[in-house]
Image (cartoon, helix red, strand yellow):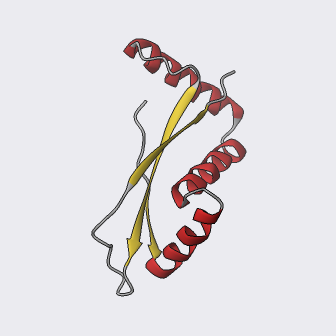
Amino acid sequence: MPNQDITIQFASAKYDALDYFFQKYDTTIEAELAKHLKRLYQSNVPMKVKEYIERDINVDVNSDNRQHHGHSQTSVQTTVLTPAGQPEPHQETQEYQGMSMGM
C-alpha cells in the first residue's frame, strides 16, 4: 500500500522554536508528528476498518515479496513558511518505520 505524504503549513519562527527544543530531546518535528498521526489513527478508526486495512497491507507486502515483518512506514512532510507566508525553498521529507498491529 503506498504511503501518503502530508503537507502542512506552519509559521517559520514557530517551526524553528520546536526544532530547537526537540533537538534537546533527541527527536524531530517529523517524528513527533508521525507519533501523533499513529495515535489519531488508533483512537479514531474502528477496529474492523483497521483489520481490513492491515489485511490489505499484508496482501500487498506478500505479493511484492518484500515482507517487512510487521513494520509499516509513515512519511511526514512539513512546509516551513517565511514571515511573509511563503514556503521556504528547502524542504525535507523523512520516513519513519514503526510497528504495525495485525489481528
Quadrant the N terminus occupies: top left
Horizontal placement of 51 versus 2: left or right?
right
Quadrant the C terminus occupies: top right
Image position, residue 89 (x, y; %): 27, 69
Instruction: Please tell me which residue is depicted at 56% across the width and 19% down the height of the picture.
Output: 69
Instruction: Please tell me which residue is depicted at 61% across the width and 70% down the height of the picture.
Output: 21
Of all residues, the one furthest to the left in this rendering is 89
Instruction: Please tell me which residue is depicted at 59% across the width and 56% down the height of the picture.
Output: 27
Q: With respect to residue 46, does 102 lie above or below?
A: above
Horizontal placement of 47 versus 69: left or right?
right
**Count of picture labels:** 0
Q: Would you identify the image quadrant in which residue 79 lies?
A: bottom left
Q: Nearer the viewer, residue 88 or 45?
A: 88
Q: Nearer the viewer, residue 52 or 35?
A: 35
Image position, residue 20 (x, y; %): 55, 71
Image position, residue 84 (x, y; %): 35, 87
Q: With respect to residue 47, does 76 lie above or below?
A: below
Image position, residue 51 (x, y; %): 64, 26
Q: With respect to residue 17, does 66 lie above or below?
A: above
Q: Nearer the viewer, residue 49 or 39?
A: 39
Horizontal placement of 40 versus 69: left or right?
right
